[in-house]
Image (cartoon, rainbow, N blue to C red):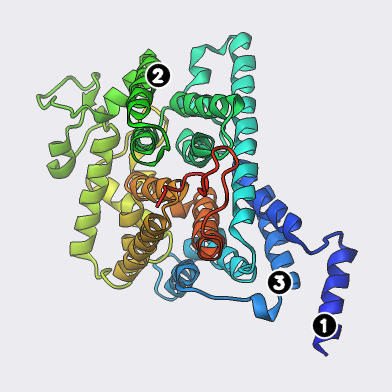
C-alpha cells in the first residue's frame, strides 16, 4: 500500500513538471528567498510551491521535528488564538494570513530534514547572486530617473527603493548576501567586488541601524573569523574603515545618520510656524504635542515605548495583549489623547504608525507569552549560531536582535518570510548538516573549513 502511495505521489509530481531531487529543493527554497523583494503575490506562489513539493515528496523516515522549528509554529498558534480575545477581530484575521509563513515554512523544512549542509550553502549562494542582480536593477532604475531630471535624491534611502519595499527592509534583505561574499569559500576578484558593491548599495539605502550593525560585523569577521595573519587582519580593518569613511562622507548619508542619532536639545518655545525638534525627555514626559513638533527616529521610538507603558497600566493586557495587529487602534487613541495629529517628512501621521519595535509590538498584541516566544526564538538562534561557529548565522542572529528594536519586522509579510526562511535554513538544514558534515574541505587553502566558520 505504501509503495502504491509513493508511486502516486511521484507520478503527480512528474505530471506537474516537478521531479523530486535536491536540485529542485534548492531551486524552490531559493525562489522563496529571491521573491521577497517582489510583490507579495509572487512570494506567496513560491511558498505554496515549496510547501506543496515538500508534502508530496516527503518520506516517513525523513520527517523530523525539532524544538527550533517548532518555535515559529508556536508563535503562529498564539496569533491564531488571539482571535478569540482580539479587540478588532477583522484586523487580526486579516493579519493572520500574512503570518502564515510562520506555520508552513517550518513544516516544509521538517519534511526536508534529510538534506545536508551543502544544499543550504547552494541556496545561500543563489540568494547572494540574486541580490546583486536586484541591487543593479535598483541602481539602473535610479540612474534612469536621475537623467530624467528627478535629482540626486533618487540614489538614496527610500527613493532608491520602491513603493513596494522600503529602504530599511531592503537593507536587511541584502545584508546576508553582502556578508556571504565577504566569507565565501573560493575568494576571487568578483567575490570581493560583489561584497564592496552590495556594501555600497546598503550605504546608499542609508538605514542607520543596518549600516552600523554591518560595519561592526565586518570588523568582527576580519578580527576573529578571518584566516588572515594578525598583521593582515589589522591592515584589512584599517582599510575597511577607510572605505566606510569615504562612503559615509557623502552628505546625504552622513546627515541622515547624524540627524537620527543626535539627541535634540531644543526645549524652549518656538513660533508655531517653526519646526520644533522633540527631545527624548519631551517624548517621554510631554502631555500634549503641537503641529510643528518633529520626532527623529530615537525620539519617536521613545514616545512609542512610553504610550505602551501607559496602555499596560490602563488595560489588562499583560497575558493576552489586544490581539494580533489590534494595538494600532490603541496607538491612534493615544495620539488623540496627546494631540499627536501632524505628519512627519514622509507624510505619515505619527499616531497611525505601529510601535516600530518588535518586542513592544508582540507584547502589546499577544501579551507576555508572545514576547517570551520571540525572545526564546532569538536566543536559540544566537546560541546555535555560536555553537556552530557559522559567521553568516551569527550575523543573521545579531542583525535580527538589533532590527527588532527599531522595526515591527514580523508584522510585515516580507519581514516574516525573510526571518522564517533564514531561521529555518540555519536552524534546520544547516544545524543538522553541521552535525553530520562537520567541515568540508576548502580547496582554496587546503583547510577543512566551511565559509564563515571559524577554525576549531
Residue on which the image places disc 2: 243
Characterize the local packing of mark 2: few (<14), some (14-19) or many (20 or more) Cα atoms within 10 angstroms: some
Vertical placement of residue 343 versus 310, above or below: above
Name the residue nearer the viewer: 364 or 286: 364
Name the residue nearer the viewer: 370 or 386: 386
Image quarter where the N terminus lies is bottom right
Total marks shown come to: 3
CA gap between label 1 and label 3 equals: 13 Å
Q: Position of residue 142 (x, y in %)?
A: 59, 20
Q: Residue at x 23, y 37 (%)?
A: 299
Residue on which the image places disc 1: 5
Residue 287 visible in this rendered orientation of the protein: no
Residue on which the image places disc 3: 55
Name the residue nearer the viewer: 91 or 137: 137
CA gap between label 2 and label 1 equals: 59 Å
Helix, strand or loop at label 2? It is helix
Q: Residue at x 88, y 71 (%)?
A: 11
Helix, strand or loop at label 1? It is helix
Relative horizontal placement of residue 133, taking residue 454 as reference (left or right) = right
Q: Nearer the viewer, mark 2 or mark 1?
A: 2
Q: Which residue lies furthest to the bottom in this view?
A: 1
Amino acid at each position: 500500500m505504501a509503495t502504491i502511495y509513493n508511486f502516486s505521489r511521484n507520478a503527480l509530481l512528474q505530471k506537474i513538471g516537478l521531479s523530486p531531487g535536491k536540485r529542485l529543493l534548492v531551486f524552490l527554497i531559493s525562489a522563496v528567498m529571491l521573491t521577497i523583494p517582489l510583490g507579495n503575490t509572487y512570494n506567496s506562489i513560491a511558498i505554496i510551491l515549496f510547501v506543496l513539493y515538500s508534502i508530496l515528496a516527503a518520506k516517513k523516515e525523513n520527517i523530523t521535528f525539532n524544538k527550533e522549528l517548532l518555535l515559529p509554529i508556536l508563535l503562529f498558534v498564539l496569533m491564531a488564538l488571539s482571535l478569540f480575545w482580539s479587540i478588532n477581530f477583522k484586523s487580526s484575521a486579516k493579519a493572520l494570513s500574512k503570518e502564515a509563513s510562520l506555520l508552513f515554512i517550518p513544516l516544509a523544512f521538517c519534511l526536508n530534514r534529510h538534506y545536508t549542509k551543502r544544499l543550504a550553502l547552494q541556496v545561500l549562494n543563489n540568494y547572494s547572486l540574486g541580490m546583486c542582480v536586484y541591487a543593479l536593477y535598483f541602481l539602473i532604475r535610479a540612474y534612469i530617473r536621475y537623467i530624467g531630471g528627478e535629482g540626486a535624491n533618487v540614489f538614496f534611502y527610500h527613493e532608491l527603493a520602491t513603493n513596494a519595499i522600503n529602504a530599511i527592509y531592503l537593507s536587511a534583505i541584502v545584508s546576508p548576501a553582502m556578508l556571504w561574499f565577504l566569507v565565501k569559500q573560493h575568494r576571487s576578484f568578483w567575490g570581493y567586488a560583489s561584497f564592496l558593491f552590495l556594501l555600497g548599495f546598503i550605504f546608499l539605502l542609508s538605514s542607520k541601524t543596518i549600516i552600523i550593525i554591518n560595519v561592526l560585523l565586518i570588523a568582527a569577521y576580519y578580527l576573529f573569523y578571518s584566516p588572515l595573519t594578525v598583521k593582515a587582519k589589522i591592515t584589512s580593518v584599517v582599510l575597511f574603515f577607510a572605505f566606510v569613511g569615504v562612503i559615509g562622507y557623502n552628505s546625504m548619508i552622513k546627515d541622515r545618520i547624524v540627524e537620527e542619532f543626535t539627541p535634540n536639545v531644543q526645549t524652549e518655545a518656538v513660533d508655531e510656524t517653526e519646526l520644533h525638534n522633540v527631545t527624548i525627555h519631551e517624548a517621554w514626559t510631554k502631555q500634549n504635542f503641537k503641529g510643528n513638533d518633529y520626532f527623529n527616529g530615537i525620539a519617536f521610538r521613545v514616545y512609542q515605548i512610553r504610550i505602551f507603558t501607559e496602555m499596560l497600566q490602563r488595560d489588562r493586557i499583560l497575558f493576552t495583549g489586544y490581539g494580533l495587529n489590534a494595538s494600532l487602534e490603541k496607538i491612534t487613541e493615544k495620539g488623540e489623547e496627546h494631540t499627536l495629529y501632524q505628519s512627519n517628512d514622509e507624510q505619515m501621521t505619527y499616531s497611525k504608525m505601529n510601535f516600530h519595535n518588535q518586542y513592544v509590538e508582540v507584547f502589546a498584541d499577544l501579551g507576555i507569552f508572545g514576547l517570551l516566544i520571540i525572545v526564546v526564538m532569538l536566543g536559540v538562534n544566537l546560541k546555535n549560531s555560536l555553537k556552530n561557529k557559522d559567521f553568516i548565522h551569527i550575523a543573521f542572529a545579531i542583525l535580527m536582535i538589533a532590527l527588532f528594536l527599531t522595526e515591527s519586522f514580523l508584522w510585515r509579510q516580507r519581514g516574516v518570510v525573510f526571518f522564517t526562511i533564514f531561521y529555518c535554513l540555519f536552524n534546520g538544514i544547516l544545524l543538522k548538516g553541521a552535525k553530520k558534515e562537520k567541515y568540508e574541505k576548502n580547496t582554496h587553502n587546503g583547510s577543512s573549513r566551511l565559509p564563515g566558520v571559524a577554525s576549531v
